[in-house]
Image (cartoon, coloured by chain):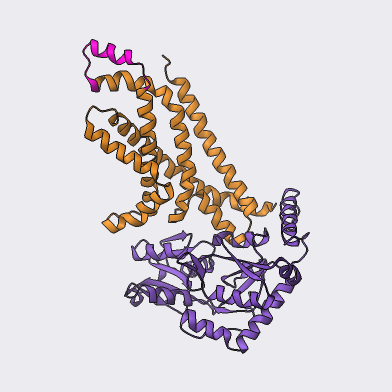
Chain colours: A purple, B orange
Amino acid sequence: MLNHPVRRRLLITAGSLSALSLLPARSALAAPLTLEQIKKSGELRIGVEAAYPPFTFRKDGNIIGYDIDLADIFCKTLGVKPTVIDTAWAGVIPSLYSGKFDIIMSAMSYTAERVKRVGFSLPYAEASQAMLVRAGEDATIKSPKDLNNKVIAVKLGSPGQVLQAKINDALKADGGVGFKELKIFDDHPAAYISLAQSKADVVFNTVPTLAMVLKDAPGKYAMVKGIGADNWAGIACRTEDTEIVKFLDSEIKKLRSDGTLEQLQVKWFGFKMTLSDSIPSFN
Amino acid sequence: MDWAIISSSMPLLAVGLLATIKICSLAILFGTLLGFVLGLGSVSQYRPIRWAILGYVDFIRGTPLLIQIFLVYFALPVIGINLNEYWAGVLALSLNAGGFICEIVRGGINSIEKGQTEAARSIGMRPSQILVYILFPQSLRAILAPITNELITLIKGSALLSVISVYELTRAGQAIIAVHFVPFEIFLLIALYYYVLITCLAWLSRYAERKLPTW
């Protein structure tokens, strides 16, 4: 217990000092976290945003989901107890670096910006982007090309926020007018409601999560797939914590080969996912 | 400190600041008007009016602003009033400020010495005339400072509008942080923008206070 908090405090001080003294590096002074330290502290602290069913969400007040089941398995291997910390998504990476938790397990998909900023594990879930529209409107909105003059809703800090800019630029490059408006919400459920209330026409999110939305609200929405490249989600660590990443990679490989991961996918999503064997590159 | 991010963010944040100023100006106008009307109504001699206003003020003071914003944006559409996030924001902030300003006005009017009312009555003024020409003008100077406080709270409360996707100052900053992961620089900058905006309002209020007559 002792090693952990002390290291954190040092890290925070180092971070704010470097900011004040205009040093470019943010956490260069911090020593990497080791598996030994985690075992000694008796807990693995996991940052999630519990508003993202079926990955992490609250049911009857408890945080459950695919990510949480998986975290339990990792913690069992380490012989520690999982401590799940619910946080706002937009602040999840800064919180990781200020030492509020050790890893992020919240269906974080690979993006060019994130790959630069965090140490990612191998993929453990599918995370290709898709569009959610009102039921019946999938007849007119069939691809991103049909988004001229539409109101787009995304979640703050989601890959959809990055994707929408690319799509909008492509629309304009094709001589279109581009989106009518972009609305940025704090979480996806708020975006879904605004879609149902006709305040937005399209919401971007990943295929597995949107499949869950269709299941939970039958007849209300429709999904349009096949936008952008295939993508996956990984577990994010601080870049210097390479030992943790290595551990997570070996765990994911093990769970994939013994079928545990597929069992969990069927339990939470109702289907088996196709996972890539490596982190996608963004060049 | 990432100076490149700061200089590239300043114009982006300025767009958000402009939205904050626009929404807050409208909400200050409507909220103050509503507050004055309700405040004058709350010292009315008609009991149903007083009770209705009391109920309204109780609701506004008894519920969080965040919930009021959600109610206006997500719940009103259920009964057929579907406002976009801009007007939902203006409405929520105005209704909220109106409730608080009502109480400030009521307190101000009640604090005017009883002799004023008696003197006005003795020269034959009607109750509504006494309120409008005698009591209200005398209370203005006293209520200006607390009203300024309330309007400052309104500006700070406008940050909550980000949750219904209003692209105001706070949301503009969050959008930058979400992509570039620079919370320290951007939040500091946002704080500075709010500070300048609120200081301007405070100056304006002091100026108005000096211009008001003393008794």
Residue A187 in the image, given as x and y percentages of width and height: 47, 62
Q: Quadrant of the C terminus of chain B?
A: top left
Indicate whether residue B113 is drawn in magenta: yes
Q: Decide which of A209, A8 is in the foreground and name it.
A: A8
Q: Quadrant of residue A181?
A: bottom left
A61 lies left or right of B109? right
B22 lies left or right of A24? left
Query: What secondary structure is the stretch in magenta mostly built from?
Result: helix
Q: Decide which of A137, A63 is in the foreground and name it.
A: A63
Residue B142 in the image, given as x and y percentages of width and height: 43, 23
Query: Which residue is at 47% across, 85% downward?
Result: A271
Residue A196 in the image, given as x and y percentages of width and height: 35, 66
Indicate whether residue A227 is drawn in magenta: no
Residue A16 vertical placement versus B112 (above, below): below
Residue B176 vertical placement versus A148 (above, below): above
Q: Decide which of A32, A18 is in the foreground and name it.
A: A32
A173 lies left or right of B125? right
Residue A211 vertical placement versus B139 (above, below): below
Q: Quadrant of residue B55?
A: top left
Residue A150 in the image, given as x and y percentages of width and height: 39, 65
The span shown in magenta is B111-128
Residue A274 showing in the rendered view:
no
Query: Which residue is at 37% across, 50% downward?
Result: B88
Residue A11 vertical placement versus B20 (above, below): below
